[in-house]
Amino acid sequence: MYIDVSNVSISFEENKEQHTILNDVSLQVEKGEFICLLGPSGCGKSTFLKTLNRMNDLVDGVKISGKVLYEGQDIYAPQVDTTWLRKEIGM
C-alpha cells in the first residue's frame, strides 16, 4: 500500500469548545492511483490533505488520532523528518 489511512479523526479546539472536522476516515491508495476528493466547502477536504503531509502540525489546537502510513512508514512517528515528508507528499 502506498498510502494507508486508518481511522483518522481530526478535531480542533476553539473558545474552549472541541469541533470535529473528520471522524474515523479510512482510505487506501496504491502507487500510481488517482483519487478525487469531492464535497462542499468546509467539509474537511483540505484538512484531510494537510494530514497526509503533516501541515496540520502547524495549526494550534488540532488533535489528530488514527494512523497514516506512507510506503509502510507511520508518518506521525517522532523520527519522521517533516521536510522530507512534505517533499514526498505535496499539495
Image (spheres, rainbow, N blue to C red):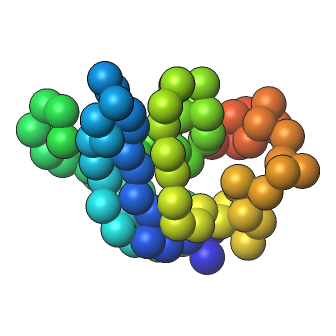
Question: Residue at 18% of width from left, 42% of height from top?
Answer: 43
At which x and y percent is residue 26? 40, 71
Q: Quadrant of the N terminus?
A: bottom right
* Farthest left residue in view: 40
At which x and y percent is residue 30? 54, 71
At which x and y percent is residue 22? 31, 53
Note whether residue 14 is visible.
Answer: yes
| Number of numbered markers | 0
Note whether residue 46 is visible.
Answer: no
82 vs 31, nearest the viewer? 82
Q: Quadrant of residue 77?
A: bottom right
* Farthest bottom residue in view: 1
27 vs 80, nearest the viewer? 80
Q: Is residue 75 above or below residue 72?
A: above
Question: Residue at 55% of width from left, 47% of height from top?
Answer: 52
Question: Residue at 73% of width from left, 63% of height from top?
Answer: 74
Q: Is residue 80 above or below residue 16?
A: below
At which x and y percent is residue 18? 31, 41
* Farthest right residue in view: 79
Horizontal side, residue 62 vs residue 16: left or right: right
Q: Quadrant of residue 31?
A: bottom right
4 vs 65, nearest the viewer? 65
15 vs 64, nearest the viewer? 15
Horizontal side, residue 67 vs residue 22: left or right: right
Question: Residue at 35% of width from left, 68% of height from top?
Answer: 24
Q: Is residue 48 above or below residue 9?
A: above
Horizontal side, residue 21 vs residue 90: left or right: left
